Image (tube, helix red, strand yellow):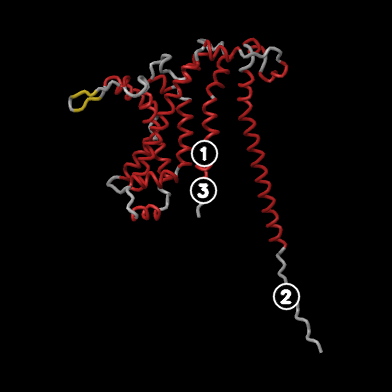
Amino acid sequence: MTAANPPAPAVATPPREATATTMAGRVRRRLSTRTATVVTIIIAVLWTIPTIGLLLSSFRPREAINDTGWWTFPGDPDLTLENYQEVLVDGRLGSYFLNSLVITVPSVLFSVGLAAFAAYALSWLTFRGRDWIFIGIFALQIVPLQMALVPLLRFFNTGVTVGGVTISLPWDSFGPVPGFTTIWFAHTCFGLALATYLIHNFMSELPKDLMEAAKVDGAGHAKIFRRIALPLIVPALASIAIFQFLWIWNDLLVALTFSTGTEDTAPLTQRLSELAGTRGGEWQRLTAGAFVSMVVPLIVFVSLQRYFVRGLLAGSVKG
């Protein structure tokens, strides 16, 4: 006599409403992902079209630019490199290009370096008034840059009076490259608050146990900063350095205020504003000069792109 087979376990059948809800959620997620992709592609295309038009216009003569639009580029019989020749040779853009490098690179190094020191002190050093200093640094970002131009320029020209004694420094003769010290100082001051605030947000998220273990091993703050903190925040430093580089490289207001305006110290942006002529009639020169000025920022961004992406994603995923 054989034993009866045990009944098969009952399989719970999900309600029809739950199944429909799950399928609707999946469809919604797929649609949202596809929609986001399509919207991103459309935005990228719309953002790139003016740049493409500027590039094509830089190879067209003045008459063609005035008569037809850049979209007639495939039918242009008279494409030319004269615009770039006028900009690089006749416009003496090379010296201004070098001035922009001399202005931008030290300004970025000064602002990011000092901000890293300040961020570490505000994150891992304990002293009275630390929180109030951080609040003050955050509040400095609210002050418009234009409000500080005149006081800072007066400080460079006449100095500062303390206790009836006027302290004035020969700013123009300072530094390894005379004439650029005031511009370095101005860009460093204007970029220091935001850089300190951003680096502090990364620095304060470092593991506390790691810092305490280093102190137990006898490491001081200088060694901890150099051996532990800096390697861990390299993506953040690279991201902030890229933004600082782009802001300073494309700056015109600070350069017009603190530079002499001559070929010895004037940046590339000042020369570009002069290439179009007093009435803006030489627009073909401006298109060529714009692409010459884009070479270095593109190289910097492509070189630091991996750190830039890691810096943007840092802190978004924990665990």
Q: Earlier in the sequence, mark 1 or mark 2?
A: 2
Image quarter of the N terminus: bottom right
Q: Are marks 1 and 2 in contact (CB under 8 Å)?
A: no
Q: Residues within 10 Å of mark 1 (few under 14, many from 20)?
A: many
Under mark 1, the amino acid is Phe
Under circle 1, the secondary element is: helix
Residue beneath label 2, please? 9
Q: Which residue is mark 3?
A: 316
Q: Which residue is mark 1?
A: 308
Residue visible at 67% across and 50% down in the picture: 28
Q: CA distance from mark 2 to mark 3?
A: 45 Å
Furthest residue in direction right, as rendered: 1
Q: Is residue 54 left or right of residue 253?
A: right
Q: Residue 84 falls in which quadrant of the image?
A: top right
Q: Position of residue 263 (x, y in %)?
A: 43, 14
Residue 197, relative to residue 248: is it above or below? below
Q: Nearer the viewer, mark 1 or mark 2?
A: 1
Could you tell me the amino acid type at mark 2? Pro
Name the residue at 64% across, 20% down. 56
Residue 119 is situated, as x and y percent measured from the top left of the image, at 37, 42
Task: Judge whether 109 appears above or below 177 on screen.
Answer: below
Upstream in sequence: badge 2 or badge 3: 2
- How far apart marks 1 and 2 lie (CA) works out to 55 Å
